[in-house]
Amino acid sequence: EAAGEEVAPLDTRFGYSREEVVRDFQKLGEDGRAVYRIVAGKIDMCFPLVYGSLFILVLAWLLKKLSQPGSKWLLLALLPLAGMIFDYLENLNTLNLLDTFPNISAEVVRRAETTTISKHVLLLACVGLALILALSLLIKRIRRRSGSFRPNRE
């Protein structure tokens, strides 16, 4: 609203350049950047806790169903923690970019972009892992059920 047009937040993009950041921050204006600072510094800091906890619980449940008790495979359920860390780093980088605007260095933008890309890759890996595990569990249950309904051939 402050920009008079849609400006996609940095954390929703897969990549961005210094020029894009400066242009978008200019479009936002002072009021828009103030709102963005609140969103990145307060609201967006809660989001990783929510999705991270959910991902950890889902992965742990699926892995528990598919592996033996005490299996080291259960450690894969902690993969979302890496995504959460990169999300927090991304938020801190966004705040840094907002604080240094208009004197944003290309190096700071590269670091911010790297954390954003890393977050997206890790979270996509979590989604992919959850889908693979869910499909594996489904196949395991189908095989178990189809095996229990076979007639005895004696």
Image (cartoon, grey):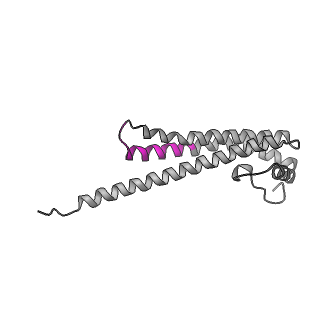
Counting from the top left corner in percent of width and height, residue 84 is at 61, 41
From the image, give the main secondary structure of the stretch colored magenta.
helix
Residue 60 within the segment the image draws in magenta: yes
Counting from the top left corner in percent of width and height, residue 107 is at 80, 41
Q: Is residue 56 left or right of residue 16?
A: left
Counting from the top left corner in percent of width and height, residue 73 is at 43, 41
Q: Which residues are magenta?
A: 52-69
Q: Residue furthest top?
A: 70
Residue 122 within the segment the image draws in magenta: no
Residue positioned 74% across, 41% down in the render = 111
Residue positioned 83% across, 54% down in the render = 2
Residue positioned 22% across, 62% down in the render = 150
Question: Which quadrant: the C terminus?
Answer: bottom left
Residue positioned 38% across, 35% down in the render = 70
Residue 141 falls in which quadrant of the image? bottom left
**27 vs 97, nearest the viewer:** 97
Residue 49 falls in which quadrant of the image? top right
Counting from the top left corner in percent of width and height, residue 22 is at 85, 49
Q: Is residue 117 left or right of residue 133?
A: right
Report how many numbered discs are placed on residues in the image. Answer: 0
Question: Which quadrant: the N terminus?
Answer: bottom right
Q: Residue furthest left?
A: 154
Q: Is residue 89 left or right of residue 59?
A: right
**27 vs 122, nearest the viewer:** 122
